[in-house]
Amino acid sequence: MDCFLDYPMSDRYFPIHWVLFSYAWFKNGILKHCTFSTTAADNTQEEKNEQKEKISVTFVDKDGEEKHIKVPIGMSMLEAAHENDIELEGACEGSLACSTCHVIVMDMEYYNKLEDPTDEENDMLDLAFGLTETSRLGCQVIAKPELDGIRLALPAATRNFAVDGYVAKPH
């Protein structure tokens, strides 16, 4: 545990183990801030929690090649794809203005765990190439613990009405 002393007329805080000789000040109520630091064992637990806060996702490209990645809880599949060099365009950068991040959930069990698509997402999906019953926009599929193990297929092509033939680079 690290406790901090606030010295009068000073804007600096000092860890109490630096100033143990000033016990009288501590006893007289000078102590204003006390924070807890973690031990090595606590850090290991935090690392385990961080690992648990990621889910396994498999992207299957148009050639059938699989790429297994770990995705933090709360991240969209579009962001995860960009961070892992997976070719998922996302021309509108996740603003629901295109269908270039179209993915196909390969297992109905996982599809049913997703929230229902909004009207805006359905409007964009209507423009998607190779639409299927389990199609979703990658920007709208958000990692959550129930999706651990989800498999997403990338369609053979996308429709980008803004620029034909342009391959977007993630920002």
Image (cartoon, rainbow, N blue to C red):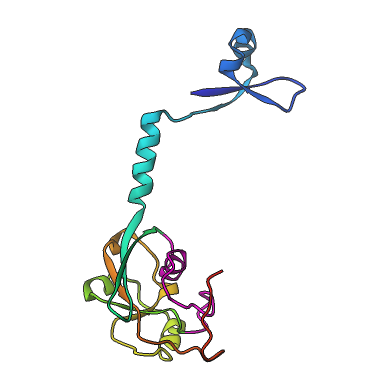
Return the x and y of residue 159 as percentages of the image width and height. Answer: 46, 90
Residue 75 lies in the magenta stretch: yes
Q: Residue furthest right?
A: 9
Which residue does the image show at 39% across and 40% down from the upper left?
Answer: 46
Above or below, 171 against 49 in this view is below
**Of residues 32 and 2, the one drawn nearer to the viewer in this rendering:** 2
Residue 96 lies in the magenta stretch: yes
**Of residues 119 and 44, the one drawn nearer to the viewer in this rendering:** 44
Which residue does the image show at 44% across and 82% down from the upper left?
Answer: 121
Return the x and y of residue 27 as percentages of the image width and height. Answer: 60, 11
Return the x and y of residue 143 as percentages of the image width and height. Answer: 37, 63
Q: How many marks?
A: 0
Above or below, 14 against 100 in this view is above
Q: Main secondary structure of the magenta part?
A: loop
Above or below, 31 against 140 in this view is above
Range of magenta residues:
74-98
